[in-house]
Image: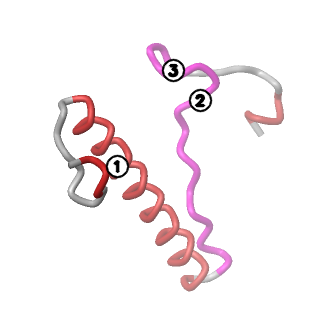
């Protein structure tokens, strides 16, 4: 509803346009659906973390063990 309002709400110090209210995984579609959504969220979190770690390591000049071109 907040997104549909057209208002650009954010917490003080937060990212512009991020109201800071996390979405909830709907349970009324059943546990199987909720687990699938949770697994997808976890995969996205891990993928984002991996990218951030590689960027950090590259800035520090460390080789990425998964990237043969970084040695």
Is 24 displayed left or right of 63 in the figure? right
- Closer-to-camera residue (25/38): 38
Q: Position of residue 65 (x, y in %)?
A: 21, 57
- Residue 48 position (above or below residue 12): below
Secondary structure at badge 3 equals: loop
Q: CA distance from mark 3 to mark 2?
A: 6 Å
Q: Residues under labels 2 and 1: Cα distance?
A: 23 Å
Q: Nearer the viewer, mark 3 or mark 1?
A: 1
Residue at image location 19% in from the left, 33% down from the top: 61
Q: Residue under circle 3?
A: 11
Magenta span: chief secondary structure: loop
**Left or right: 7 as drawn, with respect to 31:** right
Residue 19 got which mark? 2
The crowding category of the residue bearing disc 2, from other C-alpha atoms within 10 Å (few below 14, some 14 to 19, many at least 20), is some
Q: Nearer the viewer, residue 19 or 50?
A: 50
Instruction: Give x and y (percent) for residue 45.
Output: 41, 55
Residue underneath mark 1 = 49
Q: Quadrant of residue 68?
A: bottom left
Q: Residue at x 33, y 52 (%)?
A: 50
Look at the image and give the residue range highlighted in magenta: 11-29
């Amino acid at each position: 509803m907040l997104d549909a309002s057209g208002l650009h709400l954010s917490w003080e110090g937060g990212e512009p346009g991020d109201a800071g209210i996390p979405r909830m995984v709907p349970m009324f579609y059943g546990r199987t659906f909720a687990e699938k959504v949770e697994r997808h969220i976890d995969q996205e979190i891990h993928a984002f973390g991996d990218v951030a770690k590689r960027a950090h390591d590259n800035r520090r000049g460390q080789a990425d063990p998964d990237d043969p071109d970084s040695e």
